[in-house]
Image (tube, rainbow, N blue to C red):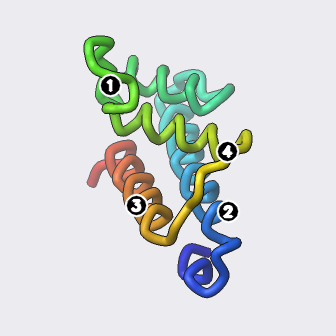
């Protein structure tokens, strides 16, 4: 979808939402495989994954958005629940790269 978004910018946000959905599904499957609770929101899944050592812990000393996982959640929530942000192709590619990076952390190797 991201490739087609370069021809029709209306597809940029749906492509980003699909990338976030892929991260959420990867977390769900990984947590299911470990016998951990995988239901609920992306926030719940991230918290469980951090406690299980799948994702690095969040340090409360740092600004929330300086953590890439926290920034991803904020961006995903903004897109899912409505935002006035303008999304350009370069931003959508960055989102897809970030999501791919998180999935590679969830499933290393």
Q: In which quarter of the view is residue 9 placed?
A: bottom right
Q: How far apart are marks 2 and 3 (CA)?
A: 14 Å
Q: Is mark 3 on a helix, strand or loop?
A: helix
Residue annotated with mark 4? 83
Q: What element carries label 2?
A: helix
Residue annotated with mark 1? 53
Q: Where is residue 57 in the image (x, y as percent from the top left)?
A: 31, 22
Q: Mark 3, mark 1: which one is toward the viewer?
A: 3
- Crowding near the residue tagged with mark 3, few <14, some 14–19, many ≥20 C-alpha atoms within 10 Å: few
Comes first in the chain, label 3 or label 1: 1
Q: Do the residues labelled 1 and 2 touch (CB within 8 Å)?
A: no
Residue annotated with mark 2? 14
Q: Which mark is residue 75?
A: none
Asked if residue 82 is positioned above or below residue 74 in the image, the reply reads below
Q: Is residue 70 left or right of residue 45?
A: left
Compare residues 76 and 43 and report the one nearer the observer.
Answer: 76
Name, please, the residue furthest toward the bottom: 7
Q: Is mark 1 on a helix, strand or loop?
A: loop
Q: Distance between the residues labelled 1 and 2?
A: 30 Å
Q: Distance between the residues labelled 3 and 4?
A: 18 Å
């Amino acid at each position: 979808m991201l490739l087609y978004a370069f021809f029709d910018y209306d597809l940029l946000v749906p492509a980003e939402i699909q990338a976030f959905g892929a991260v959420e599904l990867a977390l769900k499957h990984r947590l299911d495989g470990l016998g951990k609770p995988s239901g609920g929101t992306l926030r719940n899944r991230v918290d469980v994954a951090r406690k299980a050592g799948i994702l690095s812990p969040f340090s409360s000393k740092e600004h929330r958005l300086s953590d890439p996982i926290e920034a991803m959640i904020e961006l995903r929530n903004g897109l899912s629940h409505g935002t006035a942000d303008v999304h350009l192709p370069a931003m959508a590619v960055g989102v897809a790269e970030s999501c791919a990076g998180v999935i590679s952390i969830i499933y290393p190797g």
